[in-house]
Amino acid sequence: AQSVTQLGSHVSVSEGALVLLRCNYSSSVPPYLFWYVQYPNQGLQLLLKYTSAATLVKGINGFEAEFKKSETSFHLTKPSAHMSDAAEYFCAVSDRGGYNKLIFGAGTRLAVHP
Amino acid sequence: EPEVTQTPSHQVTQMGQEVILRCVPISNHLYFYWYRQILGQKVEFLVSFYNNEISEKSEIFDDQFSVERPDGSNFTLKIRSTKLEDSAMYFCASSDATVQDQPQHFGDGTRLSIL
């Protein structure tokens, strides 16, 4: 069975500071990994995906994530936080790319303060 | 950019009543999904649908739930006799089956409130 653990339900950073949101996964098969962002009163928007190609994945809005098999991690980073990055971020795993169900982590709410 | 659209955005229903949540997936997508998010909890998979039949369902998706693609554009989730614990945000998603690594695209959700 697959699972996702997101460490830290709330993360607060200053504007301009590094953003680091942690995600660890468990999967018995090579995983497909995704980060989604949810702004207030909106749906889930795909930030980036890992599908067994390059281990460093770049996404929208300056975010990137690195797949580390040895650590079973897929942490999300952004060098410089912007006020507009305040949202909830979800890490998800699937065992067949876009076909199969997504297993989500509990989410991390990112707050950005001036 | 094509979007998944869901209606209504908010549905209030009396306990025991039937409710139908509607979704219009992205037009060339062939895989469809429903997820739900109870307030303060994680997003949970309910069901996936492909080629006019359910391909996978979770333990949550019991006999009270059903899905249907009544025409070429809509994808619906029906709850026959709603319970208080069905109150949640319900998300529809769709995916392009022609390329394996294509992600699922989500709608903005329907907030279902059971009174």
Image: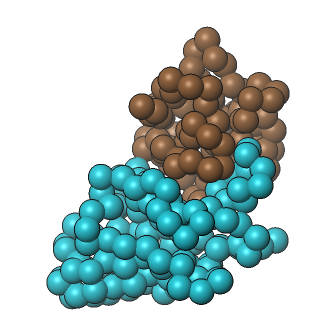
Chain colours: A brown, B cyan
Q: Is residue B65 visible?
A: yes
Give left or right: position of B99 versus B10: right
Q: Residue at x 62, y 26 (%)?
A: A30
**Relative vertical location of residue B5 with respect to residue B13 in this rendering, above or below:** above
Q: Identify the image quadrant of residue B97.
A: bottom right
> In the image shown, does A112 or B111 lie closer to the viewer?
B111
Q: Residue at x 81, y 38 (%)?
A: A58
Q: Identify the image quadrant of residue A57.
A: top right
Quadrant location of the C terminus of chain B? bottom left
Give left or right: position of A108 versus B64: right
> In the image shown, does A18 or B73 lie closer to the viewer?
B73
Indicate the position of residue B107 as horizontal and vertical percent values: 59, 70
Q: Residue at x 65, y 83 (%)?
A: B72
Q: Could you tell me how many numbered marks the image carries?
A: 0
Give left or right: position of B45 versus A60: left
**Relative vertical location of residue B41 with respect to residue B94 in this rendering, above or below:** above
**Relative vertical location of residue A72 with respect to residue A15 in this rendering, above or below:** above
Indicate the position of residue B104 as horizontal and vertical percent values: 64, 56
Q: Residue at x 73, y 46 (%)?
A: B100
Work out which residue is located at the far top of the displayed protein and give it.
Answer: A70
Indicate the position of residue B20 as horizontal and vertical percent values: 39, 84
Q: Is residue A82 visible?
A: no
Indicate the position of residue B99 as horizontal and vertical percent values: 78, 50
Quadrant location of the N terminus of chain B? bottom right
**Relative vertical location of residue A11 with respect to residue B79 in this rendering, above or below:** above
